[in-house]
Image (spheres, grey):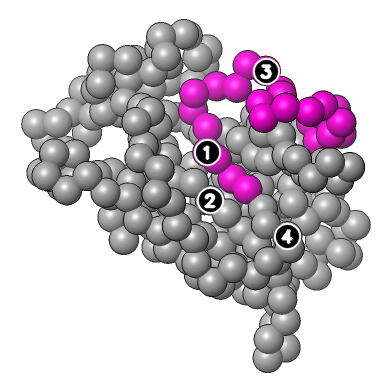
């Protein structure tokens, strides 16, 4: 349940129309789980699954779209449909969740094999998001550095692509000390098996706000979106 609305970002800067909602810790159904995984067993975990993208890829090729921006939309839409994937702590350490999270994603520089992290404002309108995302990729494709596009909001979801490898798992050993409690999502190289095209998708989750049930919903929503692309691609 929501105790009150806080329109300040965890870093203290105003976030405009994106609101940060505080959780009422006295009535929240997961308050005991949150405190347990915050104090006694501080842990994150990773999960990897294979998403059937056969129909999605057919539509991508048929409409002459780029696969990377399409998957950024699919993952971001799944994240924004679930409150547990948009949680963070404000500057006083109070738990809450954002109205919306925007994808923060990597682009690869072929000439020197480095990457840069940029972001695009999320829109539920696929056509608008796709055009904004491809425009950002074009604008920042030759700008070097770890973080290049400025003014990234604190309400973001880290997403990356590993197109050279079909991974079977993912692991992190870096402790999370930031107020961010969002998942970190990675998808790899798709491949064919038994007449289907499969995509490995991994997620790193903070157990204090996201149990296996919530992580499963993320992957299942990604699969649902990939199975019915005509429902959200519109007349692109």
Q: Nearer the viewer, residue 167 or 58?
A: 167
> Element type at marker 3?
loop
Q: Is residue 229 magenta?
A: no
Quadrant in which residue 106 is drawn: top right
Q: Looking at this view, name the residue that lies furthest to the bottom.
A: 194
Regarding residue 47, the answer to whether it shows in the image is yes
- Range of magenta residues: 135-160
Q: Which residue is mark 2?
A: 185
Q: Which residue is mark 1?
A: 157
Quadrant in which residue 120 is drawn: top right
Q: Which badge, 1 or 4, is on the more N-terminal residue?
A: 1
The residue positioned 62% from the left and 52% from the top of the image is 74
Q: CA distance from mark 4 to mark 2?
A: 14 Å
| Mark 2 crowdedness (10 Å alpha carbons): few <14, some 14-19, many ≥20 | many
The reply, left or right, for residue 236 in relation to residue 8 is right
Q: Which badge, 2 or 1, is on the more N-terminal residue?
A: 1
Vertical arrangement, residue 215 with respect to residue 93, above or below: below
């Amino acid at each position: 349940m929501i105790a009150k609305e806080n329109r300040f970002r965890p870093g203290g800067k105003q976030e405009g129309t994106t609101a940060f909602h505080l959780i009422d810790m006295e009535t929240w159904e997961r308050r005991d789980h949150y405190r347990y995984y915050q104090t006694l067993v501080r842990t994150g975990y990773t999960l990897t699954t294979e998403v059937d993208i056969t129909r999605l890829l057919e539509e991508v090729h048929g409409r002459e779209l780029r696969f990377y921006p399409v998957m950024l939309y699919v993952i971001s839409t799944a994240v924004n449909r679930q409150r547990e994937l948009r949680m963070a702590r404000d500057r006083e350490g109070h738990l809450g969740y954002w109205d919306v999270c925007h994808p923060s994603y990597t682009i690869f520089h072929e000439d020197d094999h480095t990457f840069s992290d940029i972001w695009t404002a999320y829109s539920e309108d696929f056509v608008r998001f796709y055009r904004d995302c491809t425009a950002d990729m074009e604008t920042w494709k030759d700008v070097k550095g770890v973080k290049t596009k400025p003014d990234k909001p604190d309400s973001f979801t880290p997403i990356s692509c590993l197109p050279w490898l079909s991974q079977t798992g993912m692991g992190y050993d870096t402790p999370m000390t930031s107020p961010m409690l969002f998942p970190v999502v990675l998808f790899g190289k798709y491949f064919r098996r038994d007449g289907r095209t499969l995509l490995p998708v991994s997620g790193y989750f903070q157990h204090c706000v996201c149990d296996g049930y919530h992580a499963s919903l993320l992957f299942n929503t990604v699969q649902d979106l990939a199975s019915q692309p005509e429902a959200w691609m519109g007349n692109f």
